Image (cartoon, grey):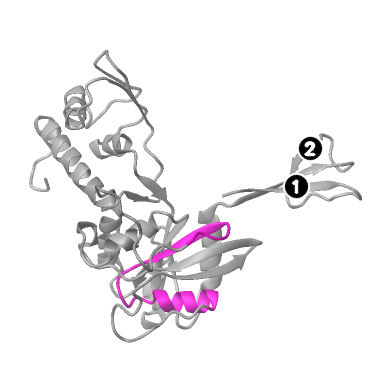
Amino acid sequence: MARTQKNKATMGHLGLLKARLAKLRRELIEPKGGGGGGGEGFDVAKTGDARIGFVGFPSVGKSTLLSNLAGVYSEVAAYEFTTLTTVPGVIKYKGAKIQLLDLPGIIEGARDGKGRGKQVITVARTCSLIFIVLDVLKPLQHKKLLEHELEGFGIRLNQSPPNITFKRKEKGGINLTSVVTQSELDMDTVRTILSEYKIHNADISLRYDATAEDLIDVIEGNRVYVPCIYLLNKIDQISIEELDIIYKIPHCVPISAHHKWNFDDLLEKMWQYLMLVRIALVWGSSVKHQPQVVGREHLLNDEDVVQIVKKV
C-alpha cells in the first residue's frame, strides 16, 4: 500500500486493501475459539477510579517509575525483559484512587504476535489512560513504533471517535450523505469497503472530511479511544537546551523516574487527561433546589445532606 500512488483511480483499491488488513488484525484481537484472555500474570482486576498502563520497550524505566510513584517493588535490572508479568500499584491523588500497571516491555512486531505483545496490548485496551514511556535519547523512533503497534490492536491514542453515522438496514442499498466535500471517500470507495464486509444495505452520514480508515474503524466497532501521555524518561542525560525543545512536543512530560524529577507536572497532567468528574448533590437550606448540583467550593449548612457523584 505504501508504494501505491494516492489518487481517485486508486482510492477504491486502497480502501479494499485497508478493509482486508483491518479484518486480519481483528482476528488477532479476537481469536476464534475463545481463550483470548489476557493470559497468566497479565489479567489484573480493576480497582479504584481509573486505570493507567505503562507501555514501552524493555529497559526504558517503567518499573522504576512504578516503584517511585506508588511505592511498589517492581524488579529493576540492567538487562531487558526484567518485568515478565503485570505489576500493579495504586496512588491517591486529589481524592481519587488510581491503579497503575507496569506492563512487560513489548518489542517491534507485537501486533503480529511477536513476544508477549498481544497480552500486553490487550491489557492496555482496558486502561483509562496510557503512559508511553520513552528513552529520551531516542524518543521519536520509539514513539512511532509503539504507536504503530497499539494502532494495530485497535487502540487510538488522543483521538475522538469518528463523527460518522453508520446504520445497517435490510434493503435499499447504500445511502451516502455528507455535509462537507470528501477528498477520499466517494460512493465507489465506500461501496468497495462495504463489499469486503458483505454489507450491501446501509445508511452512512459523514460529518467531516473522513478517511477510509475512519470508516473502517466505525464498521469494525472494536476500537478504543484512549488518552495518552508520552513520558520522556532519563532527562538527567540531556542538556537544558534539549529539554526546552522536548517541552514543545504535544502530550509529552519529561521526567527522570530514577531521580523523581518533574513528578508534580506528571501527576497534574495525568489528572487533566483522566478527566475524572466529581460533583455533589445537596439537599438542605444551603441550596435553592432539592437536590441541587454544586461544586467543591459550595458552603454547606447544618443538617444538609450530601451525595458525592463520580463520573469515570
Name the spot of residue 111 as percent of width and height, x first.
23, 57
Name the spot of residue 121 as percent of width and height, x first.
33, 59
Name the spot of residue 113 as percent of width and height, x first.
21, 60
Mark number displayed over residue 227: none
Separation (CA) of disc 2 from disc 1: 9 Å
Q: Quadrant of residue 171?
A: top left
> Is 132 contained in the magenta span?
no
- In the image: residue 294, left or right of residue 83: right
Q: Quadrant of residue 252?
A: bottom left
Write down the residue under mark 1: 307
- In the image: residue 266, left or right of residue 173: right
- In the image: residue 242, left or right of residue 141: right
Q: Residues within 10 Å of mark 2 (few under 14, many from 20)?
A: some
Residue 153 in view in this figure: yes
Q: Quadrant of residue 233?
A: bottom left
Write down the residue under mark 2: 291
- In the image: residue 53, left or right of residue 192: right
Residue at left 14%, top 33%? 11
Name the spot of residue 239 as percent of width and height, x first.
38, 80
Q: Which residue range is magenta in the image? A: 45-71
Q: Amino acid at mark 1?
A: Gln
Asked if residue 8 is positioned above or below residue 260 in the image, the reply reads above
Q: Residues within 10 Å of mark 1 (few under 14, many from 20)?
A: few
Asked if residue 23 is positioned above or below residue 184 in the image, the reply reads below
In front of the other: 153 or 40: 40
Quarter of the image that includes the N terminus: top left
